[in-house]
Amino acid sequence: MLDLCLLGTGGMTPMPRRWLTSLMLRCEGSDILTDCGEGTQIALKEVGWSPKSIDIMCFTHLHGDHISGLPGMLLNMANSGRTEPVVMIGPKGLYNVVRSLCCIAPGLPFEFRFIELDQANEEYKLGPYVISCFKVSHSVPCYGYSFTVPRKGRFDAVKAKELEIPLPYWNRLQKGESVTDMKLGKTFRPEMVMGPERKGLKVTYSTDSRPTEAIIRAAAGADVFFCEGMYGEPGSEEKAREFRHMTMQEAAQMAAEADPQPGELVFTHYSPSMIYPKDYIEDVRKIFPAAVCGKDGMIKQLDFEGD
């Protein structure tokens, strides 16, 4: 199971009912916070989620509307009792920016482990997640992320009995361990009793970019594709090109071109000038029917197929 919360959907400037961009994921007691704009810690309190279990923070880029909420969030995590290290992932320069911001968040009881991105594509296995980082096209180095929760194959109890594998070893084999029984003179390996890997869960998140093939590839097969919808009004294409953003229509076109298509496209990172994104959603659905307007506090729960 994977829980998602779109904490903030604003771009550039926070609005009275729209905090700046942030997405949180929760799975097996490990939480990821992606971007941390102004107001993120307030948004977190509004939905009743705790900051204590945030193990990983991912930043698309180092503009203020994506990282300015970090000092307060770190202090909030410390006050909640967190002492375990936090992994920080983002473009090159993240270390210097975080260290500078920590001047106003001193004495934190946990350390940071930095992963600075500089390649077009990088992938990391952290906790229950596989995090795929892909470079996009903005005015500064910027990355999108796909978060995948893999799912192991089924354990074949009948086969385990046929192979006379002692019952105490079953759990270890399910966890991917090989077990050697010196008394029997045998080694039991997971592939002897585990079926093929089943479909996992996938969430893709991308903001602050022109449309790119990298985003289309990353969105392919995602259960949920969070993408910026900075502009929606007709005639905004030129503005989007100038400031290296995209329109809702361009995001929908990418979702439509992904193969396989994502299960749902959720818009975020709206321009402050776009008060009612829903005004444009019907036209957008002509391009990609499974498009919805994200809003602050939107929560989704993803379950594995068959559960």
Image: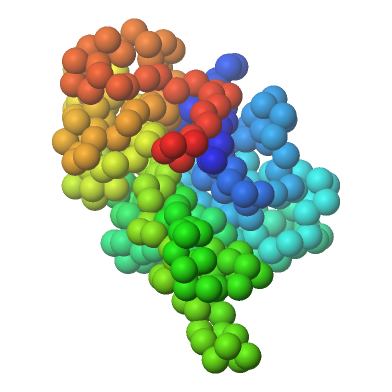
Left or right of residue 11, residue 56 in this image: right
98 vs 164: above or below: above
Q: Is residue 61 visible?
A: no
Left or right of residue 10, residue 277 in this image: left
The residue closer to the viewer here, 231 or 115, is 115
194 vs 52: above or below: below
Left or right of residue 203, residue 110 in this image: right
Expressed as whole percent of the image width and height from the top left, the position of residue 299 reads: 55, 27
123 vs 10: above or below: below
Placement of the N terminus among the 4 image quadrants? top right
- Residue at 47% in and 45% down: 63
Quadrant in the rendering for residue 84 = bottom right
Expressed as whole percent of the image width and height from the top left, the position of residue 88 reads: 56, 59
Quadrant in the rendering for residue 168 = bottom right
- Residue at 55% in and 73% down: 165
Expressed as whole percent of the image width and height from the top left, the position of residue 92 reads: 44, 64
The residue closer to the viewer here, 6 or 119, is 6
The residue closer to the viewer here, 96 or 190, is 190
- Residue at 47% in and 73% down: 163
Expressed as whole percent of the image width and height from the top left, the position of residue 184 reads: 58, 88
